[in-house]
Image (cartoon, helix red, strand yellow):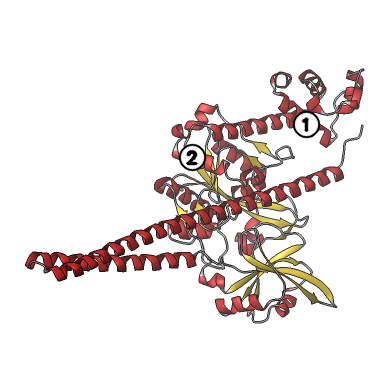
Amino acid sequence: MDEKLEKAEKKVLVEIVKLVQKRGLEGTQGGWKDFLRSYDKKFGASLSDPSRRTNDVLVSFLKTFTKEDDLKLFSIVFQSLSNRNIVEQFRKQSWDNESPEQSLVRLTLEHPQYPLDYAFPTVDEGWIVTKPPKRSRAMKSNAMIAVDCEMVLCEDGTEALVRVCVVDHDLQVKIDEHVKPTKAVADYRSEITGVTAGDLNGVTCSVADIQKSMMKLLSGGTILVGHSLHNDLQVLKINHARVIDTSYIFKILDVPIYRKPSLNNLCKSVLGYEVRKPGAAHNCLDDACAAMKLVLAKLERGEITLVLDAPEPEREKLLLHRIPVNVRREEISKVIPGAVAIEPKPSKTPQGRHYSAFAVFDSPPEASKAYENMEGDEEKDSSGLPQKLVNFQFGNGKTARIYIRKMAQDHSHREFSSNKRALDGEEKLVKSKKLKTDEETTHANSDTEIPSDERAKESTESKKVETDGKMVEEMRESTNKLDEHLKEIERLKQEVKEKDAKIVLQEKMISNLVKKVDEMKKGPKRKK
């Protein structure tokens, strides 16, 4: 470890010292400020910012740590930062030399949401960081495996792994195991996971056992594939550098870049079939195979642009979200007249003090009418869909508020398209008239000599043809300009969407950092 510390870059040393401070760790000479007081007689602890200290000071402090747990923590930080550097190398490498598989890794790493989704707490207990091979080997390896996990909700509000499935490039099963949770289970979420309490009878496999199996499969620079893969890595407690996230790699029209398509919708659009029928439980193995098939389809077909719209059954619903947990579904039905049912929205992750549901209607027009009649402040959600914030009373006069959102986009640009089609029709009509006039003139010239009084008429008709031709050119120019305007409008729309996406991501990152700071303040510190 001493050799690693001496060769480390300053930014690495600074990060480790800051982590030591946050955790309240102490070496043989105490904490960071205690060390400075004894080490630096001139400035002492008054200059406590690690970034303003020399490498020698930082290394000297870190060498005072001798406990096995502390050294293990340092090793994890080194490995995590090494993976981060590899990610940067992947981003900067020449596109000309990369394999098709590596191009999908790069596409994942370049997604705006990657830094937020894949910021794992790798220094926490139980986490492992895969050790990547040398850069040249990692770049050449095109081996891939796909993973999918099922999680249950524990009584303390956290999630626990209950099933893991892994398949290779040929869809051969490498892992299919149930995992025994280490905490008391509050909800098996069987309608989502397909796992019941009975499935875990006699199960002894642990997360650590799965980690060992995964480490073997991921050696040699193997690429890990999955849909919203960060959720699986979070519960597996594995940090791996080479990943392909199928929720990132497909271009979808008219959808903000941070709005992820479901695995089921992607399979329906790309592969031509659904992974599961509506209402059916997840099957871990099917989902892992589906993610691999999506990647194979992308590799075979190249650029795939999708248009995902809400299917007809979805248009019969309104999404209700941010519902306080103390508001029952029966209370909600009173707020939304015309709804034939209030269905809870399945979620793979616990939602804390709120939950979501669907208000189901007999038809899309009924759903649209109910939304329009709803009193509330209208706005657009982060996906650009219209929603209203509705206040209502429930129980013994208590007040609550929920968001009610439409399930589909309003495509305002269709009006432009129809106008363009109208112009195309007019242009064809003018061309037809011109062609007919030309044919008549040619036929007349070939039969007889035209009298002088008819020459004037021909001249007039010729001018008319010329005028028609100018009209065609003018209309063609107008059409081209309209096309340019439409493209510019779409470009500006996309810019606005991307800026909105960045703002939303920044707000989420700030929120997560605030939560982490609060947790650190509340967490126990070691005694001196």
Residue 144 in the image: above or below residue 494: above
Tell which residue pokes out farthest to the left in this image: 448
Label 2 residue SS: helix
From the viewer's perspective, is 174 left or right of 190?
Answer: left
Q: Quadrant of residue 469?
A: bottom left
Residue 243 in the image: above or below residue 197: above
Residue 379 in the image: above or below residue 30: below
Foreground of the two, 79 or 59: 59
From the viewer's perspective, is 455 left or right of 276?
Answer: left
Q: Which mark is residue 103?
A: 2
Q: Quadrant of the N terminus?
A: top right
**Could you say where residue 147 lies in the image, as x and y percent from the top left?**
55, 47
From the viewer's perspective, is 467 left or right of 312?
Answer: left
Give the class, few, some or many, for how many residues have Cα within 10 Å of label 1's Cα (few <14, many ≥20).
few
User: Is residue 219 visible to us here?
Assistant: no
**Could you say where residue 291 lies in the image, as x and y percent from the top left?**
51, 51
Q: Quadrant of the C terminus?
A: top right
For disc 1, the marked residue is: 69
Tell me the distance, in whole angstroms, between the alpha carbons under discs 2 and 1: 38 Å
**Could you say where residue 76 lies in the image, as x and y percent from the top left?**
70, 32
**Could you say where residue 161 lies in the image, as x and y percent from the top left?**
66, 51
Foreground of the two, 75 or 102: 102
User: Is residue 313 visible to us here?
Assistant: yes
Foreground of the two, 84 or 498: 498
Q: Residue at x 74, y 53 (%)?
A: 158
How many numbered discs? 2
Give the class, few, some or many, for how many residues have Cα within 10 Å of label 2's Cα (few <14, many ≥20).
some
Name which residue type carries label 2: Ser
Name which residue type carries label 1: Asp
